[in-house]
Image (spheres, rainbow, N blue to C red):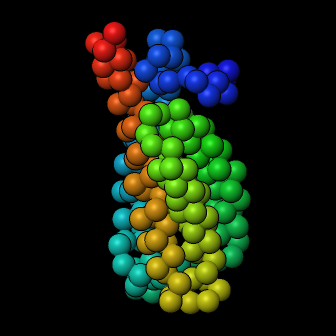
Amino acid sequence: MKEIADRRAELATLSPGTRLAYSLFLVFSLASYVVMAVLSVQRSGWTPDSVSRYYLGGGDAYGKTAGELLEVTHFHLFSMPMFLFVQGHVFLMSRFPARWKRALVCAAFLGAALDLAAPWLVLAYGPGFAWTKLAARALLGPTLVLFAVVPLREMLFGGRRAAAGN
């Protein structure tokens, strides 16, 4: 934790044990994104119509109840911010441009907020709000991948370049 708090710490120069722990966390994160993407596509598809059908029902899908949404929202309100906090901190330790880092962290949290709000908006206000789920995916998906790939790349290959420059 002290390495996360040290503003001078660079991912490529962290101790081997810390780099291993961070790298394994990020590899598991990437695997979870694949599962998340598959689940999302299987459940609610890629279009506003398929998203609204998933939440409101229709065809072979049954509509979600407020109780079901409360359970999912409750779990995700705890897990998503914590996950973004940890992965965001690791990403913020990268050499990525500071302005972009801040913007991407904000985009990730906005994507998470939209992801949490989307089912409620569709249920309360109708299928016209299904676009919020697609916007959430567009913001959250790429930022999460960057949060994992950028630090992994630096930890695995950044040290060699820094050492070669000495």
Determine whether 42 is above or below 57 in the image. above
Write down the quadrant of residue 43 in the picture.
Answer: bottom left
Asked if residue 11 lies left or right of residue 41, the reply is right
Residue at image point 39% right, 37% down: 150
Could you tell whether 110 is left or right of 156 in the image? right
Q: Quadrant of the N terminus?
A: top right
Total residue callouts? 0
Task: Kindly identify the residue that appears in the image at 47 percent across and 24 percent down.
Answer: 11
Q: Position of residue 53 (x, y in %)?
A: 45, 82
Quick check: 15 above or below 1? above
Q: Is residue 41 visible?
A: yes
At x 28%, y 12%, the residue is 164
Horizontal and vertical percent for residue 78? 70, 51
Q: Quadrant of the C terminus?
A: top left
Give the camera-side residue of 46 and 111.
111
Residue 51 higher or lower than 153, as above or below = below
Closest to the observer: 49 or 162?
162
Q: From the top left corner, tell me how far across and down residue 111 is, in percent.
A: 53, 62
Q: Is residue 136 above or below residue 132?
A: above
What's the residue at 40%, 47% (across, down)?
Answer: 145
- The percent position of residue 148, horizontal first and vertical second, equals 43, 39
Let me know if residue 32 appears in the view: no
Q: Nearer the viewer, residue 20 or 10?
A: 10
Q: Residue furthest front?
A: 166
